[in-house]
Image: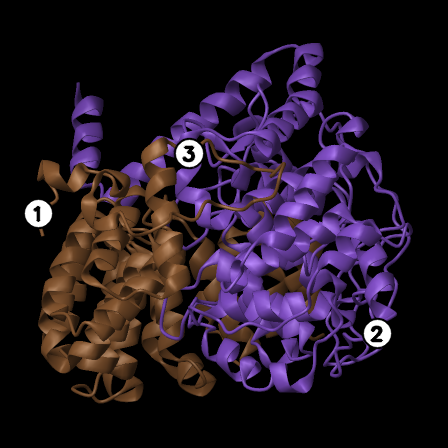
């Protein structure tokens, strides 16, 4: 199907094969709102589409018509839906249809209908389509590493069709390129929790913590690995508070100067709320960050309890993370006295 | 020279995310810097909502759209809703002729797609009145694309039409729950990335089916709170760029949470929605004098909010969570409402009418709708309910910037929502 050909630019009314069809005009009523000033070629193509759609004509010419309609407006889900019906009825080659969709997707990588169509095709083609779909999403992601549809599709392919083998490595590559790519971190989480080739979250935790700690130390201001680290202990707060790597990491970050401390402080606060018994070094590191005025206020509570440490952390954050001052005040109010 | 070398080094090692982020930050900070440096009188002018221009832009859209809008052809009910809702937020109404045309158009729309059903229904509710409301044909639709949006739109429509029931709610709660990610936000599908739009939809849907308590709310709040960046606006996902539309998607999450009885809110004004796990202890905060802020001062990221004292108190039970109350019975929102208003008004607002994603992007009706919706959320963030008008300290710029309050679950203007509720309760 080569739409560079001039022949394809002929509108239905100019083609003899459409002479038997009466085009159906759009009926928006006499005075429609949000009326779009359609170009004549769009209006005509859609008028003919409406006719075949109403008649439920699933023919080669109807298929061709959906193609023209798609070119003019790839966002019309009715056209895509009808195209699928035709493809089924005519038992068309779906690999070829994938070729077709790939071309359309080049300029429309954020279009729901296209991705939905792809998913439908891949599902029909089965596990054999896995390789191709992974390649396709990889291509899209190479131009737009956070494309939501692409990631979503990729996850669906892995779960429905397989192809997990190289996924963790792929994720790693993306993170090497951009350690701030939260989509890649999210994918990593997906892999370690869902991949049939790996042992599951608990089994992977050890190595993942090491990986994540390294990422954090490289860029402590990067929110993604901090949340990822927290996620590694999802539903397992005991391991979270007892893993020395976590508190060590926080201490390291808190005692480096010129570093963003917000996530480290937030993490310690979280650990405390789950029962962490803070070390003296951790306490001191937090106290050091405490602006002088607050230190005076909390002097009475300065030494021992974890809740006063939580209090101090919230006070520090109210200043260090001023955008979230109300949030930290609220967190403070939530500390159980 | 050494400084330059270091800067180049920094640039060379910078990732794509960092480069993009710094570019936006630079642009935004330039705007804030320029604002801070002009005289007070000039500042007041710039902080004004360009109501007339916005209404002009919006009305034009309703009357006639150019051929480039063809891509939205299948989603004209959305255009309708974005425009009508924006006009309603500005406290304006549409002339009778346009209104009739809108109703007529919407009732002719074939809507096999759930999202457009939502848009159409919301448009008609916004228009209000018997004609619009009776023209809604009440029906249930199958979702074409199963994701969290479908859950929200289906439930929202059913709820507003007063036909929400157990059959519909069954299974949806489990699904949305499975979409909450390790980050705390909610994704479009299980496994996908936490995202502002889906987080709003997911939370709203859960509230509508009385299952919000099944979510890890602490984790959700933490994620949303961190989506507000130094630019003062909200981003949709971690480490992505600020975008004006998230003023509503993310800001609206706070509006939803605040209304939950568990957070000291009054609920949602309908008998349908009751959160069962609520502890009904509420403790009033100490009476505190509020420092009234000079609301014309530009906020730089380092600055604090209005400078009021925190009123801390202990919860009466371990299950209750509270937001601080003041003597005016106002709630403290968990995000920086003045900063967000600053982003919307200074960075998203176009002086010629309409709103945009960020400086450098073109305006559009979608962003106009959600920037205005987000602005309304900010303005009413300290109001216990929509009947208590906000204090001037809650409104950035002149008090005339005040918009209509919305019902955060549906994002339609409150008054119209209640009118529709009354109408459909008779069926």
Q: x%, y% of residue B177? A: 51, 79
Q: Which residue is drawn at 26% across and 47% down?
A: A19
Front residue of this view, candidates B320 and B60:
B60
Count the marks: how many?
Answer: 3
Q: Could you tell me if the residues under marks 2 and 1 are in contact, i.e. CB atoms within 8 Å?
A: no
Q: Kindly report which numbered mark, 2 or 1, lies closer to the viewer in this rendering.
A: 1
Q: Residue at x 33, y 52 (%)?
A: A111
- Residue A2: mark: 1
Q: Colour of chain A?
A: brown
Q: Which residue is drawn at 67% across and 77% down?
A: B209
Q: Distance between the residues labelled 1 and 3?
A: 25 Å
Q: Distance between the residues labelled 3 and 2?
A: 46 Å
- Locate the C terminus of chain B by quadrant: bottom right
Q: x%, y% of residue B216? A: 56, 76
Front residue of this view, candidates A177 and B131:
B131
Residue picked out by circle 2: B271
Task: Check chain identity for marks 2 and 1: say if they share one.
Answer: no
Residue A308 position by quadrant: bottom right
Q: How crowded is mark 3: few (under 14 residues within 10 Å), some or many (20 or more)?
A: some
Q: Kindly report which numbered mark, 3 or 2, lies closer to the viewer in this rendering.
A: 3
Q: How crowded is mark 1: few (under 14 residues within 10 Å), some or many (20 or more)?
A: few
| Observer able to see residue A182 | no
Residue picked out by circle 3: A38
Q: How crowded is mark 2: few (under 14 residues within 10 Å), some or many (20 or more)?
A: few
């Amino acid at each position: 199907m080569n739409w560079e050909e001039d022949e394809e630019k002929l509108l239905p009314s100019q083609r003899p094969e459409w002479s038997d069809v009466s085009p159906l005009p759009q009926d928006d009523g006499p005075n429609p709102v949000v009326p779009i000033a359609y170009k004549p070629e769009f209006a005509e193509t859609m008028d003919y589409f409406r006719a075949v759609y109403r008649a439920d004509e699933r023919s080669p010419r109807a298929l061709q018509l959906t193609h023209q309609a798609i070119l003019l407006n790839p966002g019309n889900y009715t056209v895509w839906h009808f195209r699928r019906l035709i493809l089924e009825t005519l038992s068309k080659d779906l690999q070829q249809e994938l070729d077709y969709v790939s071309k359309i997707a080049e300029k429309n990588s954020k279009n729901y209908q296209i991705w939905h169509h792809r998913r439908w095709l891949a599902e029909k083609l089965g596990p054999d389509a896995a390789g191709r779909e992974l390649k396709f999403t990889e291509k899209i992601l190479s131009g737009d590493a956070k494309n939501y549809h692409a990631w979503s599709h990729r996850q669906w392919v892995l779960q429905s069709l397989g192809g997990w083998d190289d996924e963790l490595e792929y994720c790693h590559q993306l993170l090497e390129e951009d350690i701030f790519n939260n989509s890649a971190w999210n994918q990593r989480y997906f892999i370690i929790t869902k991949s049939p080739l790996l042992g599951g979250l608990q089994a992977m935790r050890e190595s993942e913590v090491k990986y994540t700690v390294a990422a954090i130390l490289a860029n402590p201001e990067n929110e993604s690995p901090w949340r990822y680290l927290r996620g590694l202990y999802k539903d397992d707060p005991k391991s979270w508070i007892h893993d020395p790597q976590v508190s060590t990491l926080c201490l390291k970050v808190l005692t480096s100067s010129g570093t963003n401390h917000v996530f480290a402080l937030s993490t310690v606060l979280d650990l405390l709320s789950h029962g962490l018994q803070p070390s003296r070094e951790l306490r001191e590191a937090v106290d050091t960050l405490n602006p002088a005025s607050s230190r005076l206020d909390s002097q009475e509570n300065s030494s021992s309890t974890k809740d006063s440490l939580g209090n101090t952390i919230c006070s520090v954050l109210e200043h260090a993370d001023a955008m979230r001052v109300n949030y930290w005040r609220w967190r403070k109010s939530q500390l159980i006295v | 020279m050494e400084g330059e070398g270091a800067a180049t080094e920094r640039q060379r090692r910078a990732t794509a995310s960092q480069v993009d982020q710094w570019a936006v930050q630079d642009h935004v900070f330039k705007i804030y810097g320029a604002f801070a440096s002009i005289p007070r009188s000039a500042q007041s002018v710039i902080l004004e909502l360009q109501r007339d221009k916005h209404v002009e832009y919006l009305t034009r859209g309703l009357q006639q759209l150019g051929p480039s809008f063809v891509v939205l052809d299948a989603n004209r009910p959305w255009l309708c809703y974005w425009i009508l809702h924006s006009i309603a937020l500005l406290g304006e109404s549409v002339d009778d002729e346009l209104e009739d045309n809108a109703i007529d158009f919407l009732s002719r729309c074939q809507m096999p797609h759930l999202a457009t059903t939502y848009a159409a229904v919301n448009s008609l509710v916004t228009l209000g009145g018997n004609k619009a409301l009776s023209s809604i044909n009440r029906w249930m639709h199958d979702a074409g694309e199963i994701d969290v949006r479908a859950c929200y739109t289906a439930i929202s429509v059913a709820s507003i039409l007063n036909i929400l029931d157990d059959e519909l709610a069954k299974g949806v709660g489990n699904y949305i729950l499975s979409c909450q990610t390790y980050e705390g936000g909610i994704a479009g599908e299980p496994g996908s990335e936490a995202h502002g739009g889906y987080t709003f939809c997911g939370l709203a849907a859960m509230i509508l089916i009385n299952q919000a308590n099944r979510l890890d709310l602490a984790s959700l709040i933490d994620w949303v709170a961190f989506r507000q960046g130094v630019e003062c606006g909200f981003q949709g996902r971690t480490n992505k760029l600020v975008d004006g539309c998230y003023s509503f998607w993310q800001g609206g999450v706070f509006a939803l949470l605040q209304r939950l009885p568990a957070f000291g809110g009054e609920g949602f004004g309908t008998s349908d929605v009751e959160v069962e796990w609520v502890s009904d202890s509420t403790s009033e905060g100490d009476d505190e004098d509020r420092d009234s802020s000079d609301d014309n001062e530009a906020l730089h990221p380092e600055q604090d909010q209005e400078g009021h004292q925190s009123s801390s108190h202990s919860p009466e039970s371990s299950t209750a969570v509270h937001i601080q109350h003041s003597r005016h019975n106002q709630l403290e929102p968990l995000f920086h409402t003045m900063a967000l208003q600053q982003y919307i008004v200074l960075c998203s607002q176009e002086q010629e009418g309409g709103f945009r994603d960020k400086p450098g992007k073109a305006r559009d009706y979608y962003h106009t709708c959600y920037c205005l919706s987000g602005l309304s959320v900010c303005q009413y963030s300290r109001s216990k309910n929509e009947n208590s008008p906000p204090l001037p300290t809650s409104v950035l710029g002149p008090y005339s910037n005040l918009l209509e309050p919305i019902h955060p679950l549906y994002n339609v203007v409150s008054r119209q929502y209640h009118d529709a509720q009354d109408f459909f309760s008779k069926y």
